[in-house]
Image (spheres, rainbow, N blue to C red):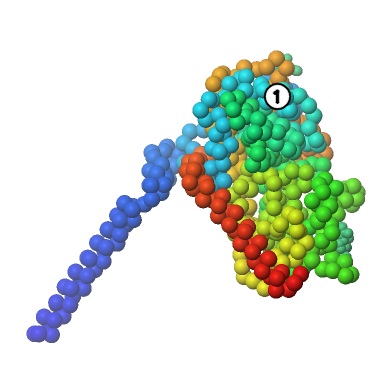
Amino acid sequence: MARALNGTASRTSLLFLLALFIGAIISARWIDVSTLSAKGAKELAARSKPSVYKSPQKPRPPLPERPLNCTPINTNCSSLPWPPFPSIQNLDPPTSTCPDYFRWIHEDLKPWKGTGITQEMVERARRTATFRLLVIDGKVYVERYAKAYQCRDDFTIWGMLQLFRRYSGRVPDLDLMFDCVDWPVVKRWDYRGRVVPPPLFRYCGDKDSLDIVFPDWSFWGWPEINIEPWEALLKDLDDGNKKIKWMNRDPTAYWKGNPYVADTRKDLLKCNVTETQDWNARVYVQDWIKESQQGYKESNLANQCTHRYKIYIEGSAWSVSEKYILACDSPTLLVTPHYYDFVTRALMPTHHYWPIKGDDKCRSIKYAVDWGNSHKQKAQAIGKTASSFILEDVKMAYVYDYMFHLLSEYSKLLRYKPTVPEKAVQYCSESMACPAKGNYEKFMKESFVKVPSDSEPCILPPPFEPPALQLLLRRKANAIKQVETWEQNSRKKTKL
Ligand SMILES: *[C@@H]1O[C@H](CO)[C@@H](O)[C@H](O)[C@H]1NC(C)=O
Ligand SMILES: *[C@@H]1O[C@H](CO)[C@@H](O)[C@H](O)[C@H]1NC(C)=O
C-alpha cells in the first residue's frame, strides 16, 4: 500500500514536474521575447509586418531580371523603360545594422549639418571637380569637366548607375561634384571661419581636409591593370587564403607595387633582403608593362597570400591595394598612413593590423616579423580579424549600402530642387556598357546589376557621441604607442 501510494505520489510528482517543465519552456520563450534588445525587437516587429508575399502559400515571385540589352536603340537612355525596374512591394526588412564604419557618414557630412547645402556651395566645388552628377526624378545626368586618369571617372559613374539599379527608384534627387584625383583639396583650415566649405566627393581624405569620401572605382573593376570587380575578386581572395596554411607560408613580409609614386615607397626598397642584411622584408617592383604582356600571370591577387606578413604602404595618397592586402589572412604590416578611405577609419592597430613606423620602416618591419613569428597565435588572429572584416563587412552589398546611405543623407541636406544643367547628358548603364570594348566591356557586364535588391539597405547606425569618438581615437593612438614601446625595449636589449 505504502508502495502503491508511493508510486502514485511519484507519478503525480512526475506529472507535476513535467507540467512545470513545459511551463518553464513556455515562459522561457516568453522571457526570451520580452528581453530582446531594442534592435532585435525592432527587427522582429518588422519581420512580423503583414506581407502578401511572405506567407508560405504565396511566396514572393522572383524579382524581375533585366539583363543588359544592347540593341543599338538602347544606347539612347531616354528611349529606355523608366525606372529600370518596376517598383517592388514588400521588400524584406533590413536584416541588420550596418557595420560601424558607416558612422563616419555622419562625420563627413557634419560641416553642412547646420547650414544645409545650397546650389552655390555645390557650384563652388566645381573648381577641381572631374564631373557633376545629378539624380532628378530618378533619372541620372552627368556633366563632365575633365577626363580622369584611366577608368576612374567612368567606373565611378558606372558604380553609381548600378546603385540606382539596385535600389531602383529609391535614391532621392541629388546634385554632387566628384573629383577623381588622389589628394583631398578642401582644406579644413580654409573654412574655420564663416565660409561654409564646398561639398566635394572623392576617394580619400585626411585629418586636415573636409572632402567627402566615397568608394573608389575599383569595386567595379580596374580594366587597365586587369583587376576584376570586387564581388568576384573577393571570392578569389577568400580561396587564395586557403591555398597555403599560414605556418607553411614564407616567414617574412612581402610587398609588391610601384615604388616610383612616392618617396616613402622608394624608401621601402632599402628594407629588401641583401647578402649582408635581412630586415625580414621581401619587396618587389611591379612592372605593369611586362605584366600586361604576359597576361598578368604574376599579378594574380589571389596568389599573393604566400608570405606570413604583407606590407601596406601608401602611394601618392591612399591606395586601392589596401583592401586586397587586408583580405589576405596574413597579418598586414601597415606603414603609418596619412590618408583614409571610406572603411579604413574603422581599422584598429594590433587588432586588424600591425603598425609600422613610417620614419623607421626597416627596423620596425624586422621587429614586427620577429614578434609575429614568436607569437604565432596572436599574429594569425590579427590576420584573420582583418580578412573577415574585409570579406564580411566590406562585401559588395555593404559597399552599395554605404553609397545609398551617404547619398541619401547628403540629399537630405540639399536646400534646393536640382535642375538639369545645360551641358549635362542623361546617363544609363546601356549608354556606358554597350559601346564599351575590352576589359571595360567585360567588367561592366560582370558588375551590371540585373536584379534590384530584395531587401532594404542595412540600418544606418547613429553618429558617434563625441566622447565615444574621442575614446576611439585615443585607443588607436595608445595601441600604436604600445607597439613603439615594445619596439624600443627590444632594441635596447639587442642594441640594434
Ligand atoms: C533618343 O530617344 C528619344 C526618345 O525616343 C529621341 O527623342 C531622341 O532623339 C533620341 N536621341 C538620339 C541621340 O538618338
Ligand atoms: C629584393 O630581393 C629579392 C631577393 O634577393 C630580389 O629577387 C628582388 O628583385 C629584390 N627587389 C628589389 C626591388 O630589388
Q: Residue at the spot x=82%, y=54% of the render? A: 267
> Residue, x 8% and y 85% (percent of image)?
1
Which residue has dot 1 on it? 126
Q: Is residue 139 left or right of residue 413?
A: right
Could you tell me residue 433's position as x and y percent? Answer: 75, 33
Q: Is residue 15 above or below residue 103?
A: below
Q: Residue at x 79, y 41 (%)?
A: 223
Q: Residue at x 74, y 38 (%)?
A: 182
User: Picture quarter containing residue 405?
Assistant: top right
Residue nearest the viewer, comparing 101 with 439: 101
**The disc labelled 1 sits on which kind of residue?**
Arg
Query: Which is more toward the observer, 78 or 406?
Result: 406
If the image is split into quadrants, where does the C terminus sit? bottom right
- The percent position of residue 396, horizontal first and vertical second, equals 63, 45
Q: Does residue 173 show up?
A: no
Residue 206 picture quarter: top right
Horizontal relation, residue 257 to residue 143: left or right? right
With respect to residue 470, does 371 lie above or below? below
Residue 480: image x %, image y %?
63, 57
* Most distant residue in the top direction: 422
Name the residue furthest left: 1
